[in-house]
Image: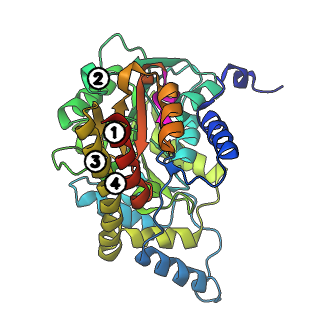
Amino acid sequence: MLNTHYKDLKDSYLFYNIAQKVNAYLAQHPGTHLLRLGIGDVSQPLCAAVIDALHAAVDDQANKETFHGYMPECGAPFLRETIAAHYAKRGVVLSPDEVFVSSGASDELGDILDLFDKSAAAMVIEPAYPAYVDANVMAGRQIVHLSSGRENGFLPEPDDSIDADILYICSPNNPTGAVFSRDQLQAWVDFANRRGAVILFDAAYEAYIEDETLPHSVFELDGARTCAIEICSLSKTAGFTGTRLGYTVIPKTLERGGLNLNAMWVRNRTTKTNGISYILQKGGAAAFTDEGQSQIRQQIALYKRNAKTLTDALDRIGLWYCGGHNAPYVWLRCPNGMDSWTFFDFLLQKGQIVGTPGAGFGACGEGFFRFSTFGDPADTAEAARRLTALLG
Ligand code: PLP
């Protein structure tokens, strides 16, 4: 009667274990201020342009003339048009009905799997955001684990031995901060078209790209319109982690086996959702105005200063790392041959710093460690000072 694939899920001890260890430490050292560089949540509030739009939208709901009931299931036209116009600034031409407004990337990464058969195998490049594997295991799908490492900069290339139908690509990557170049991503797009596979491109961190040669969207590459879906979110771009808003792009040219994925998703959304709140969509649209974009850029700049503070410390210490420049995560080699949980304990006990052990992102993450740059700047600076004192 029940979905027994849930039995196949490996218990994810990562954040549970971190919480247990942190609580045990605090019980022994009450009142300690921990420097939290572990979780991927933001620390800065929503920007003024978004807050003003949210307030105005709440007021709209108070008047019969401006009140909105159910919103269109695939998104309000004003927001779909705004997002399409945002892509156009980077030369990506989308029709507004190729943009679907969502309640965030996590929800969408799980829900989008409705489009695929259970027999479709899913390739996950590891280390990876854990939800990719778990969502497919729940559905009983076969997972093709593709390991990456320092030797390929955590950016593996496709090869014809990869036997998968759904290809997860996260760039900039969580947890490694690695970003595919245009040529590298083009190779994946060509591979997907050759195989008839579909890329699920997770662009949750595209706003952190500084190097203008790097692609923000898979649709900047030739041929992506026949093989890719892009899932994006305002969580890390505009601080919507607790407010919840995202968007998904499914080109109308994406077809497999005589079925059109855009049309299938319209059918899915009109069946399974009643749209996203008018208030949130107004708030989200404000993030794309000139004023909103400039305020968001200031917040991202603050997180980037955190990244610089941490990478400067790692440079002083001489520890290998990647990420931090075009991504909000710094991914480092654990020092002195420590495994990632040993390094976690060491930092907690000796420096009162909380990070994330790489082993939690797949077997090939062992020996590495993730720092988030979303934390409080003063705490990040203090963590960098302590890291230098402990390891320098
Ligand atoms: N994708 C990646 C790679 C993430 O790291 C996260 C959140 O940390 C998400 C998606 C989920 O984002 P959202 O808050 O939009 O659900």
Mark 2 is on which residue type?
Arg
Callout 2: helix, strand or loop?
Answer: helix
Residue highlighted by disc 1:
177
Q: Position of residue 251 (x, y in %)?
A: 37, 45
Mark 4 is on which residue type?
Asn
Q: Earlier in the sequence, mark 2 or mark 1?
A: 2
Identify the disc placed on residue 306. Answer: 4
Near mark 4 (Cα within 10 A), the count class, few <14, some 14-19 or many ≥20, is many
Residue highlighted by disc 3:
216
Mark 1 is on which residue type?
Gly
> How is the protein colored in the picture?
rainbow
How far apart are the two marked residues, 2 and 3, measured between alpha carbons?
A: 23 Å
Q: Position of residue 155 (x, y in %)?
A: 29, 27
How far apart are the two marked residues, 1 and 3, measured between alpha carbons?
A: 14 Å
Depth order, front residue of 27/129:
27
How far apart are the two marked residues, 4 and 1, measured between alpha carbons?
A: 14 Å
Q: Which residues are magenta?
A: 356-362
Residue highlighted by disc 2:
150
Q: Position of residue 151 (x, y in %)?
A: 25, 19
